[in-house]
Amino acid sequence: MEIRTGGANKCVLGEQIKNYRKTEGLTQEQVANYLGVSTPAVNKWEKGVSIVKDTTPISQNSRLNNIP
């Protein structure tokens, strides 16, 4: 999965997270736990309400590919 962060790409990233999560049959809570963020953070990313900050694991690498 290609990860894009910040600015105009916040909706694109949120859509990518949501699509990946649903394809893999994961909950927002599972994704949040794996990335070390809150469930509301994942929810906001998916809705495009907030952006992924540079300090979150998802912005540093594509950890979503390794969610158990």
Image (tube, rainbow, N blue to C red):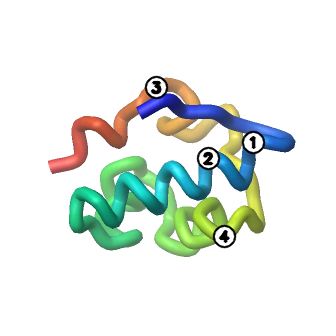
Within 10 angstroms of label 2, few (less than 14), some, or many (20 or more) residues? many
x%, y% of residue 63? 36, 35
* Circle 1 SS class: helix
Residue identified by numbered label 4: 47
Within 10 angstroms of label 3, few (less than 14), some, or many (20 or more) residues? few
Q: Residue placed farthest to the left in the image? A: 68
Label 2 is placed on what type of residue?
A: Leu
* Circle 4 SS class: helix
Task: Give me the C-alpha separation between circle 1 and circle 3.
Answer: 16 Å
* Circle 3 SS class: loop
Task: Give me the C-alpha separation between circle 3 and circle 2.
Answer: 13 Å
Within 10 angstroms of label 4, few (less than 14), some, or many (20 or more) residues? some
Task: Give me the C-alpha separation between circle 2 and circle 1.
Answer: 6 Å
Within 10 angstroms of label 1, few (less than 14), some, or many (20 or more) residues? some
Residue 29 position by quadrant = bottom left
Q: Nearer the viewer, residue 56 or 65?
A: 65
**Mark carried by residue 9:** 1
Q: Look at 50% across and 66% down and name the residue there.
A: 38
Q: Nearer the viewer, residue 51 or 37?
A: 51
Task: Give me the C-alpha separation between circle 3 and circle 4.
Answer: 21 Å
Q: Do the residues labelled 4 and 2 touch (CB within 8 Å)?
A: no
Residue identified by numbered label 2: 13
Task: Give me the C-alpha separation between circle 4 and circle 2.
Answer: 10 Å
Label 1 is placed on what type of residue?
A: Asn
Residue identified by numbered label 3: 61
x%, y% of residue 6? 77, 38
